[in-house]
Amino acid sequence: MMTLLMAETRRSWKLFLRYPAEAIAVFAILALMFAGLYLGARFLAGGQDFGTRVDSIVAGYIAWMLVLGIFSGVAGEIEQEAKIGTLEQVVLSDRSFLAVTMARVLANLSINVLITLSVLVCILLLTRSSFHITPAVLPSVGLLVLGTTGLGLMMGALALLMKKATALIGLSQFMLLFLVFFQKRDGSEQTLQWLDFAPLSSAASLMRHILATGYMPTTADHLIPAVNAVVYLAIGCVLFQMALRKAKRNGTLGHY
């Protein structure tokens, strides 16, 4: 597995360095998108600051950026392989296609983190927000990545069957924005709400809370996000394998 991961990491970084214009475009779009939203909201508010809420908004936007790369990455890789005609060869290799896909998610994660941190620097300069970046946030980030990987595998399952899911992914990104910015009602942090069972919401909410306020989470705080992430990852793996078997039976892996 480590050999596969190292090979996919080298592949991802070579592609990233070979086409830097695409990465620069993604960075510029994400930074300008936040700048437009932030400055537009300040204008509508009469030039007033958002106070401590801006920290939570910035944290939510950073979580959304991290989620986007993972969510769309799986289906994007499958579409690209299908378009150039190498999908069938990758699937029929001696490595499990699920293992290859998971390795690619981890390999691309380092690039996603680099772009996200670069945008974060620009956002902090614009908003003058104070962040509490501590090791305490790492478990919630890891759980957010796990849950998003499960959703990405579900999109990948559709891409295996449809070969093209770009429009659906684009629409789903706005739903992810809602899930990432979900906030529990005051005084209800210890109670279950229906959105706790929705993907990503509990892990993203905990991550935002830590980054915005410097909160030190307990083991109990990670319980619901952990169960949520594992369940959606398992569902994603099952659906991905089912779609792969159906595509093999139909003989459509080599078609686009």
Image (spheres, rainbow, N blue to C red):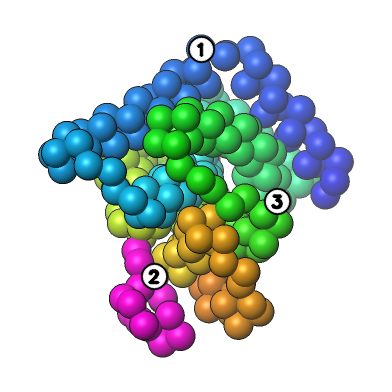
Q: Is residue 183 above or below residue 219?
A: above
Please state the extent of the stretch shown in magenta in the rendering: 182-197
Mark identifier at residue 99: 3
Mark 3 or 2: in front is 2
Between tags 1 and 3, which lies in front? 1
Dot 3: what SS?
A: helix
Local secondary structure at mark 2: loop
Q: Are marks 3 and 2 in contact (CB under 8 Å)?
A: no
Q: Which mark is residue 198?
A: 2
The residue under label 1 is 21
Identified at 85% across, 46% down, the residue is 2
Q: Which circle's residue, 3 or 2, is located before the other in the chain?
A: 3
Q: Which element is circle 1 on?
A: helix
Q: Mark 2 or mark 1, which has the lower sequence index?
A: 1
Residue at the spot x=67%, y=37% of the render? 110
Farthest residue in the right direction?
A: 3
Q: Earlier in the sequence, mark 1 or mark 3?
A: 1
Which three-letter amino acid code belongs to the residue tagged 2?
Ala
Q: Is residue 122 visible?
A: yes
Image vertical order of residue 10 relative to residue 156, above or below: above
Q: Are circles 1 and 3 on residues that touch, CB within 8 Å? A: no
Q: CA distance from mark 2 to mark 1?
A: 35 Å
The three-letter amino acid code for the residue at tag 1 is: Ala
